[in-house]
Amino acid sequence: MDLLAEAGYGHLTMEQVAARAKVSKDSLYRRFPDKLALVTDALAHRARAVPDAPDTGSLPGDMRAFLHALLRSRNAAERALAGVSSEIATNPELRAAWHRGLGGMLTGRVRQIVTRAAARGDLAADSDIDLLSQLPLSLLQNWRLEHAEQPGDEVADRIVRQFYTPAAPSRQRPGEGGA
């Protein structure tokens, strides 16, 4: 993952990987027929470290616990994303590998949280599960780009408060509405 982040997918070579791993290029090619297979395996390996979807009994609790755990485990995932992000949009095979590996696992965990919340009635019946499943990951990634720093728990808490915490019932002021 470190070499992928340093070189980027486009400049990563099997020679560099072999040298970093202190193995022969032939040994590397026996295990991985090409760079895509190597990176696909690395992404799949990293996906196993994605935190489980917690079940605290509430959408805000589940999302907060997941995002905090994700931020604590984010270094390797961040390096992987940095190494492949520029290529994902233009390389269909790499995009598929990303979705089968780390990207799919991350979105899948958030989707599990959101789907469970919808089944409990924590979300409106017409909630866009797909959009709500992508939103926190996109916001965390955008935070890195906009602020040139890793988001912390306080950013995760803001995301949960803004998008995953049900609004308190509004109270009518004296003299408003009513019969």
Image (cartoon, rainbow, N blue to C red):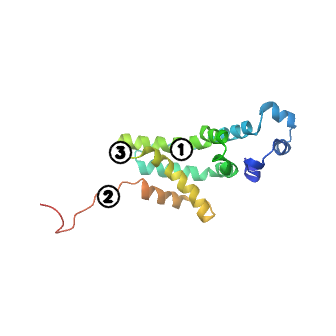
> Between tags 2 and 1, which lies in front?
1
| Secondary structure type for disc 2 | loop
Residue mark closest to the camera, 3 vs 2: 3
Which of the two discs, 1 and 3, sits closer to the camera? 3
The answer to whether residue 73 is left or right of residue 161 is: right
On residue 168, the disc is 2
Which quarter of the rendering shows the C terminus?
bottom left
Q: Residues within 10 Å of mark 2 (few under 14, many from 20)?
A: few
Residue hosting label 1:
107
Q: Which mark is residue 126?
A: 3
Q: Say which quarter of the image contains residue 172.
A: bottom left
Q: CA distance from mark 2 to mark 1?
A: 28 Å
Amino acid at dot 2: Ala
Residue 74, image x, y percentages: 62, 51
Residue 151 visible in image: no
Query: Do the residues under discs 2 and 1 have CB atoms within 8 angstroms?
Result: no
Q: How busy is the neighbourhood of tag 3: few (under 14 within 10 Å), some, or many (20 plus)?
A: few
| Mark 1 vs 3, N-terminal side | 1
Q: Tell me which numbered mark, 2 or 1, is placed earlier along the sequence.
A: 1
